[in-house]
Image (cartoon, grey):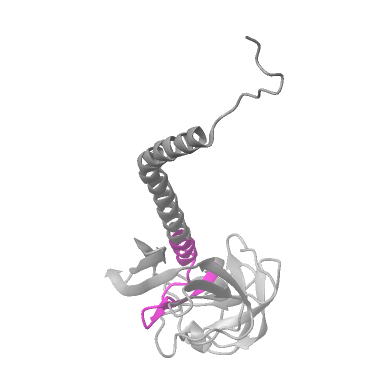
Amino acid sequence: MRRSANFQGGFTLVEMIIVMVITGIIGGMVAMFIRAPVQGYADSARRADMSDIADTALRRISRDLRLALPNSVRVTGTNTIDFLSTTGGGRYRAGAGGANDELDFTVADTSFEVIGAMPAMVAGDQIVVYNLGIPGADAYQNNNRAAYSSNAGGVITFAAGKRFPLESPGKRFNVVREQVRYICDIATGNLTRYWGFPIAPPSTGVPAGGSSALMASHVSACNFTYDSNVVAQRNGLVTMRLSITESGETVTLYSATHVSNLP
């Protein structure tokens, strides 16, 4: 018996429904098995990102602190840290000899001869001698720093005469480039670095002028501490704790950095 020429093969509605139900059951079972690994991978990636953000920020602060002028680190409150960043230093002539241009501490001197290699300096740099971070010998108060003008023949010249209050026992001077301030603003969740603004006593406020850069976001907690007398008044210790929170999870990293306080 021949089939009709109009016969067409296919699925019935019941068969299609059965296939859809079976496919849905299989898909649900597969999803149950792969959901946990996929979610775990996403969580691990997020934690790694948060750890990387905190670690990068703390490493940058530590690197900056190692260039801090001795006795210039200041922690205001627990969320703000200031210091004066140096680019180099050297020894000044304190007695007759050479070009006979010794640094005179009895008058407002305008220049001095450098003993040894001349440090690299640019306009706007400051020459600091024997910073103790105390009244009368505090670079923030402009007691012991003078604006650099030029250098030639091994002699540094100031922009204006300066009488430094105290001689350095080691006849050392430092070259300060700028003040740096890190502020943790928990309200906005940002850790920001500020630099290039006029040198002024440390505070918790955003400085006027200069430049800024965001170091970390999603900051939920931040704590700076500073002990200025860890090793016989020669070294201080800055401790930093930074917490990053995202999607209900928090990563907290801790770091400690030694700073030289030998002026």
Q: Look at the image and say whether residue 23 sits in the magenta stretch.
A: no
Query: Residue pushed farthest top?
Result: 1
Magenta stretch holds residue 70: yes
Per the rendered image, the range of residues in magenta is: 57-86
Q: Position of residue 144 (x, y in %)?
A: 51, 84
The residue positioned 35% from the left and 73% from the top of the image is 223
The C terminus - image quarter: bottom left
Q: Pick whichever, 37 or 91, lies toward us.
A: 37
Count of marks overlaid on the render: 0
Q: Is residue 176 visible?
A: yes
Q: Position of residue 42 (x, y in %)?
A: 43, 49
Q: Measuring 43% from the left and 39% from the top, which residue is drawn there? A: 21
- The percent position of residue 54, horizontal first and vertical second, equals 43, 61
In the current view of this chain or complex, which residue is farthest to the front?
1
Q: Residue at x 45, y 66 (%)?
A: 65
Judge from the rendering whether residue 77 lies leftward or rightward of residue 147; answer left or right: left
Q: Is residue 129 above or below residue 248?
A: below
In the image, 106 versus 222, the foreground residue is 222
Res 261 quadrant in image:
bottom left
Can residue 93 be seen here?
Answer: no
Q: Nearer the viewer, residue 162 or 217?
A: 217
Q: Is residue 101 above or below residue 29?
A: below
Q: Tell me the quarter of the image containing the N terminus.
A: top right
Return the residue nearer the eye: 30 or 42.
30
Q: Position of residue 38 (x, y in %)?
A: 42, 44
